[in-house]
Image (spheres, helix red, strand yellow):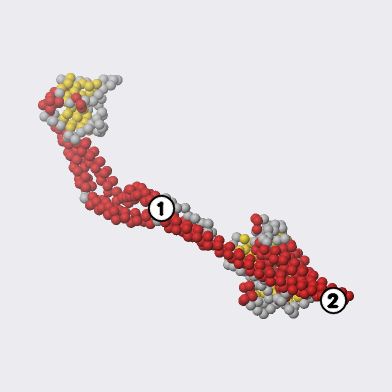
Amino acid sequence: LVAYFIVIVIFAAVPVTVITTQAVYVMVRYWQSIHLETALDGAEKLAMDHYGLQLEHFEALLRSRSLGLDALMSRGGESSGADLAAVTGTPELLAAQDFWRPAGGGWLEESFAGLEAQRLRDPPALQSGFVPREMPRDRDVIRYILAPLSGDRPGRLRLLSFHLGEGFDGTIAALAEEKTRLFRINNLGLELKPLLILYYGMFFFPTLLMTAIIAISFTRRVAQPLVDLTEATRRVAEGDFSTQIMVRQGDEFGAMVQSFNAMVREFQKSQNALVKAEKISIWQSMAQQLAHEIKNPLTPIKLSAERVLRRWQNEPERVGEILESSMMAIIQEVQGLSRMLTEFRTLSRPLEPSRTWTPLKEALEEIVAPFITPYPQVGFDLDHVDPSVEVRMESRHLNQVLTNLILNSIDAMDSGGMIEFRSDLVKKRESRYCRLSIRDTGKGMNAEEREKVFAPYFTTKDTGTGLGLAIVERIVNDHGGSVWLNSAEGAGTTFFIDFPLDGGGEASPAQAGSGTASSGAGTGESSGEEPA
């Protein structure tokens, strides 16, 4: 919006700027087309020619000796300008002044005739000829020295002051000033562009600043509610139904914001009700399944007890024949019930994340060891597990997870096969994980079995509670990790477990400063993974 407003102001200013700029350029070109410089040069030349003619005229007067000054000046004293004009008949002669200098002394005035304003205390020069003019003393005047003068006194000279014409020096100065101005105007074309940029910059900067302030204010008033609404919508989409937007007083979007807040509150109520109903449904389903699983072993227990009771009532002397087998059946079923309830308790009770680091390969060797003798047809390969890797999980929980997965792999290989373990260090987004893969050469799973494999009480075996893999998923998730599988019918199954290595901001003793990864690469479940 700020850019939009500024662009509007700039486009509105462009026509005015272009028109005025072109007008200024036209005026400058028109001014430059008038040959004032030639006229000024001509006027200056005429003035200098007039000056030269005046000097020649004055020299001619002096050469003719027709001024008649000797008689006037020989009287001594002072004479007025009228007397000087009457005697010489030359109105251009403003003053005449005789000086003499005694031996070893300074210049003394002997006589003076003319205008008092042209009187000098000392002669401005000692040689005959025109005296260099000095401003402002000689304004509109040119002075001439006659030396030496004849007479009984040596060292005499006469200073004559001639009038060049009223305003002569003023005219010459005005011509020079106008020529300077004309020079500046002629050079204005070179300076015009930066001057116009400066002018329009100073003119439009306050306008652009005011526009930016208005645009920012408009943005805060109009666009900010839309930004808040977008952000709130994103949070609601992520499941945060506690989001509420503050309604501003006098906000044109107030009604929409209020409707959005009301909608989110309704969503929150519906979500709470849905979550509550879903929890009830899950627990009802689990309770029904648990009741069914508990009922199954109760039947053989009841039958075994009734058998012993009938034999004791009818043939007490032969009760020993069935007592041992019946008691063993009861004990076996009770142990199954106890194991099932323990697994159910593990599944339903959240686990505190472990803060204990367990060496992965060492734990695997201890877990695999009890299976080697009972299952000689099954091979176990731990060569690809890095011995330096440690995972943040207590050994009892790690034992429970891996034992369940190993038993599932053994059950999937009826005639024997190979179970291969492999560890890799991977990075997902900003977190590092140890990825453990457990691959078997069993019969594999179809699509339906893969979808339900982690569901409680789902099993494809004739025996078992169906809680093993659900417990595995629960333990791994509670420790901040994840578990999934790849499987295909006839091609075996591979379970993957990601154990977090950055949980709690504390690195394992073996991993601190190491960063070593095992050779090979694991199979990734999500985008953005890379080797650690």
Element type where label 2 sits in the image? helix
Front-most of residues 278 and 1: 278
What residue appears at the point 65 percent right and 63 percent down from the top-left corner? 477
The image quarter in which residue 529 lies: bottom right
Residue 68 image position (x, y, % from top left) = 13, 27
- Identify the residue under disc 2: 314
Horizontal relation, residue 525 to residue 126: left or right? right
| Tag 2: amino acid | Asn
Q: Are marks 2 and 1 in contact (CB under 8 Å)?
A: no
Please indicate, yes or no, whether residue 514 appears anywhere in the rendered image.
no
Q: Earlier in the sequence, mark 2 or mark 1?
A: 1
Residue 17 image position (x, y, % from top left) = 30, 53
Residue 173 image position (x, y, % from top left) = 24, 38
| Tag 1: amino acid | Asp
What residue appears at the point 77 percent right and 68 percent down from the top-left corner? 335
The image quarter in which residue 297 lies: bottom right
Front-most of residues 249 and 353: 249
Please indicate, yes or no, whether residue 303 appears anywhere in the rendered image.
yes
| Image quadrant occupied by the C terminus | bottom right
Real-space CA distance between mark 2 and mark 1, rounded to the nearest whole angstrom: 93 Å
Horizontal relation, residue 58 to residue 448: left or right? left
Q: Nearer the viewer, mark 2 or mark 1?
A: 2
What residue appears at the point 36 percent right and 56 percent down from the top-left corner? 7
- Identify the residue under disc 1: 251
